[in-house]
Amino acid sequence: MLDPLYVRDHIETVQQGLANRGLDATAELQQLATCETQRRRLIPAIEGLKREQNSTGDQVARGKRNGEEVQHLYEVSKQRNQKIKQMEVELDAVERQRTLILEVLPNLPHASVPVGKSAAGNVVVRTWGEPTALDFEPKAHWDLGPQLGIIDFERATKISGSRFAILMGAGAQLERALINFMLTLHTTEHGYTEILPPFLVSSATLYGTGQLPKFETDLFKIAGEWDLYLIPTAEVPVTNLYRGEILDGRLLPLKYTAYTPCFRSEAGSYGADVRGLIRQHQFDKVELVKFATPDTSYAELESLTANAERVLQLLGLPYRTMALCTGDLGFGSSKTYDLEVWLPSQKAYREISSCSNCEGFQARRANIKFRPEGAGKAEHVHTLNGSGLAVGRTLIAILENYQQADGSVLIPEALKPFMGGRERIEAVK
RNA sequence: GGAGAGAUGGCUGAGUGGUCGAUAGCGGCGGUCUUGAAAACCGUUGAACCUUCACGGGUUCCGGGGGUUCGAAUCCCUCUCUCUCCGCCA
C-alpha cells in the first residue's frame, strides 16, 4: 500500500510513477483527493463535538458529586451524540473508499528502474559464464527426465491433473540435494536464519504481502469453512513474521531463508510453458527475505541478489542479471532484479529468481515498523525478498546444462557432497 | 467432536459505569553514586490520526464489530483468537 499521506501531497509524482508502470490512475487519484478533502473536513468537526461531549460528561460527574441538578445536560448531550454518529457514518464511508482505492494500487518504481512497457524493456545488468556449448543437439528436460527415469509427467497427471510432476530416484534426490545445498549456503556463508513456516496461511497474512485482495484467483484456497490458502511463495509467511510489530532498529537488517513448496493456480497462463517443469501448480523454492531500514534497503537488495547469484555460480550455471523495467515490475515491488539461467534446449535465458525491494509497501499493509537506535519514533521497515533459487527450475538447468552426448547428466562439483558422492545420473537399464 | 477459562500498555498483572491512557511490579531508556560494573535511589517510558512553521493543542485506541447510557476497560449481544481438560489422531 502506498503511503496515503505521501500520495496526498505528491499526486503528480504518484501519477507519473504509476503511468510508468503502464497504469493510468488519474481517476483513482482524483477520487483519493476527494476522499482526503472530505476526511479533513469531517475529522476536525467530529473531534470538536467529541471534545464538547467529554466536557459535558465531566460536568455531569462533577455536578452529581455536588448534588446539583444535571438532567438539563442530558438532552444537549443526546442530540450532540446523534450528530456525531451521523458524521462518523459519513467518515467511515469515506475511509472505506480510500482504502478500497489504495489497496489495489501497485507500488511506485524506484528512480533507478528503467522506464519501459514490457519485458522487452528490461535491461541486462551483467552476464555470468558463457552459454553452455554442446557438440550435440541438446535435449529438453521433458525428454531427458523421463528417459533417465527421474521425472514422470504422465502418472502425475493421473494423480493430480495437468501441471504436476513426479520426481523419482535420482531426480527426487537431486531436488532434495538442491534444497539442502541452498539452505546450507545461505545459512552458513550468507548469514540468513532458516525458517520452516506454515504452508497454509490466513487471508490477513496474504493481505500483508499484497496477494489479497487483488490476486485471489492466483491462489489455491482451502475448501470449507477455513480462512486458509496454500502459500504461493515463502515470502508470504516469512514477511508476515513481524506483522503488527515494532522491531528494534539496532537488530536490522534481519535476514531469513526458508524452503517451502509453493502453490499457484496460474490462472490465465494457459498456453504458456505447458510442457515440462517450468510452470507447475506446485514447486519447491528456497526464499530469501530481509527486513531493512530505508537507508540501507537498496544496498541490501544488491547483496540479496548477489547471494542468489552465488548459488548459480557455485553450480556452474550460466546466467544473466536483468533489471526489470517499470512495465514489468510486480505489484508490490519498487525495484526487481531477475536472474535468468541459460537453457540449452531453448537456446534462451529463463527466469530462475526474482529479487525485489518492496520498500514500505508491504510494511504498511502488514504494519511492520522499527524504532531507530531502539528509541524515538517508529517508522515502517523496508521488506525485501528473492528466490535463492526456484528449485525445480534449477533442477531443469542442471539436467540441460550438464547433459552428455550419451544422455547421462553429470552432477555439478558443489552438489556432489549433497548427492551422497554421486557423480552422474544415468538411465536405469 | 465434548466441557470449561480467558483476551488490558514491551512483559506480568489490578481496575466500584463518571477527570482511567488506565494502579502496581518487571523490563527498557536517562541520571545520581562507582575506577568500571552490579546493587540502591531518582526520573522517564505506547500507538494512530487531526491541527500547528514550530512549541503546543486535540481526538481515538483496554482482542474485532454492534448495542444500552448523558457517560463504557467496566453492563448486554456477536465474531475472532488463545489456553486447559476429555475424546480422536501423525
Image (spheres, rainbow, N blue to C red):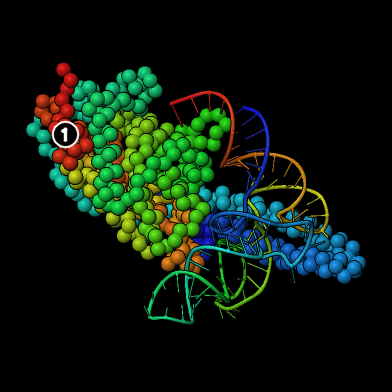
Task: Estimate the x, y position of residue A300 in percent, counting from the top left.
Answer: 32, 57
Residues A114 and A303: in front is A303
Task: Estimate the x, y position of residue A365 in percent, counting from the top left.
Answer: 50, 52
Q: Quadrant of residue A301?
A: bottom left
Q: Residue at x 19, y 45 (%)?
A: A314
Relative to A411, say whether A314 is above or below: below
Q: Secondary structure at mark 1?
A: loop
Q: Is residue A114 visible?
A: no
Quadrant of the snapshot with the C terminus of chain A: top left
Question: Label 1 sits on what residue type?
Answer: Gly
Relative to A426, say whether A303 is above or below: below
Residues A260 and B85: in front is B85
Q: Residue at x 56, y 51 (%)?
A: A99
Query: Residue A182 vs residue B77: left or right?
Result: left
Q: Which residue is mark 1?
A: A421
Task: Estimate the x, y position of residue A52 in percent, counting from the top left.
Answer: 76, 67
Query: Residue A179 vs residue A425: left or right?
Result: right
Mark 1, chain letter?
A: A
Q: Quadrant of residue A372?
A: bottom left
Query: Residue A167 vs residue A251: left or right?
Result: left
Q: Are there few (<14), some (14-19), or many (20+) residues within 10 Å of tag 1?
A: few
Task: Estimate the x, y position of residue A96 in percent, counting from the top left.
Answer: 61, 51
Q: Residue at x 89, y 63 (%)?
A: A71
